[in-house]
Image: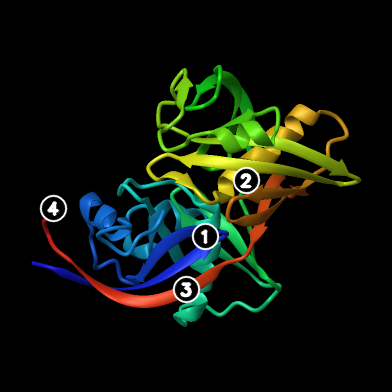
Amino acid sequence: MSIDIAFTKGHGTGNDFVLFSDPDGEVTLADAQIAALADRRFGVGGDGVIRAVRSERLPEGAAVLADDASAEWFMDYHNADGSAAEMCGNGIRVFGAYLLAEGLLDLAVGETVAIGTRGGVRQLSRTGDGFEVDLGPFVVAGEAMVSARRLDVARPGLAVGVGNPHVVVALADDAELDALDLGEAPEVTPAPPDGANVEFVVPGAISGELGRIRMRVHERGSGETLSCGTGAAAAALATRSWAGAGAPDAWRVQVPGGELGVRVADTAEGLHVFLSGPAELVFDGSVTLEDRVSR
């Protein structure tokens, strides 16, 4: 039996997603079907697939609603290989734009809405030129060695947790960053138990209260992408840690697909990291997915 999916294609700084609406949780896709939907040659194509479903309609939503009863919508996010992921910083902004376009959410500029994710509840605010998401508290701790194609020797990486796991590696200059071949997943030693996104960064100038960095990323389950929102936050947090006392709390992160804003701020729950940037919806379409997916 086949499944017909009406979808929207969207992206945040080139990190692209296939989104579809399933408010009552009636559509169950196998990992292989999700991977087929995300396939760039045989499917729609995307770095991930996002289902809009009410939190009350899926098991993971129970913890979300216990934390914040106003988190009506759950971002059911899967990587391009079909595997489920905790969070996606670019994806949640595009998710907000999608909910607005579908009439599933009313959100004026300056207003905030609670969104459920596997990484917990995230507060999403609409800005004049996109969205900002409160990624919550963060952890910067732990070291690993990272090897990658066209990197002359393994480099030390810093583990950063922002609702999903990251390892951030500092490089000497733009030439090293540009020379990397991220067509194959970098090797992280010791290997994180659930894998990790790996960011390679070149710290730039710090001007007053603003720092700048360049970044490329290999995302677990998706490969190299033009942008990674939580990766940008992790990269800024790692660079801030390396810079030491007096480091700025506001950062601009240049990725191949554009630029993202990251800031660290005090909240009632302690220090949180915030991510801001654009969200674009590109086109709508429909696709039929078969029960059994073959290549």
Spatial CA distance of label 3 from label 1 is 16 Å
Where is residue 67 shown, x and y percent of the image?
52, 53
Per the image, the residue denoted by label 4 is 294
Report the residue that reaches farthest toward the bottom.
103
Question: Which comes sooner in the sequence, label 2 or label 1?
Answer: 1
Q: Is residue 148 shown to the viewer in this render?
A: yes
Labelled disc at residue 295: none
Q: How is the image coloured?
A: rainbow
SS at mark 1 in the image: helix
- The kind of residue on which mark 2 rests is Ala
Compute the Cα span from label 4 to label 3. Answer: 28 Å
Label pair 2/1, CB-CB below 8 angstroms: no
Residue tagged by mark 1? 92
| Label 3 close to label 1 by CB (< 8 Å) | no
Q: Earlier in the sequence, mark 2 or mark 3?
A: 2
C-alpha gap between disc 2 and disc 3: 23 Å
Asked if residue 62 is positioned above or below residue 232 in the image, the reply reads below
